[in-house]
Image (cartoon, grey):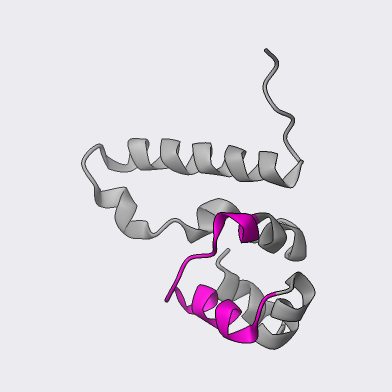
Amino acid sequence: MTLLEYLDIYEVSTYRFGKNIGVPQSVVYRWATGETLPAWKNIPLIVWATGGEVMAEDFVPYHLYSFEGGEDQASSLISALSVVFRRLNGSVPPPEK
């Protein structure tokens, strides 16, 4: 689910969402409309604030699916990013050494 979809479905304003995670309303608006992507440090906050309904991979632009290597490679990239963000959020333990 995209951030914009989440905000619409749950009728959450960009102001209220921003206040919950400590960023300005204008920044949340730019994320929701796709004008900019969240900084790495903000992804875990977004995942937390949405209860996991908006995940890191939801910010990966669809045009990545059409790059050389096709959908399989893009899917692998999205999966890898998802694990990284979940680790940052503490919901996936680091790999054992």
Residue at the extreme top of the image, as rendered = 97
Residue 84 falls left or right of residue 88: left
* Horizontal and vertical percent position of residue 83: 60, 38
User: x, y (%) of residue 74?
Assistant: 37, 42
Residue 16 in view here: yes
Residue found 49% across the figure and 60% down from its top: 59
- Is residue 13 something that shows in the picture? no
Query: For residue 88, what is the image quadrant?
Result: top right
Q: In this view, does 93 lie to the left or right of 62?
A: right
Left or right, 74 with reference to 50: left
**Residue for point 69% across, 87% down:** 15
Name the residue rendered at 72%, 47% in the picture. 89
Whether 50 is drawn above or below 67: the answer is: below
Q: Does the magenta stretch include residue 38?
A: yes
Q: In terms of secondary structure, what is the magenta stretch mainly?
A: helix
Name the image quarter holding the C terminus.
Answer: top right
Q: Residue at x 54, y 64 (%)?
A: 38
> Of 91 and 66, which appears nearest the observer?
91
* Relative vertical location of residue 28 with respect to residue 78 in this rendering, above or below: below
Magenta stretch contains residue 25:
yes
* Residue 9, horizontal then vertical, whole percent: 67, 78
Say if 25 sits above or below 40 in the image: below
Q: How many labels does the image show?
A: 0
* Residue 79 location (% of width, % of height): 51, 39
Query: Is residue 92 found left or right of 59 in the rendered image?
Result: right
Q: Quadrant of the N terminus?
A: bottom right
Q: Which quadrant of the figure has residue 62?
A: bottom left
Give the magenta part as a residue range. 23-43
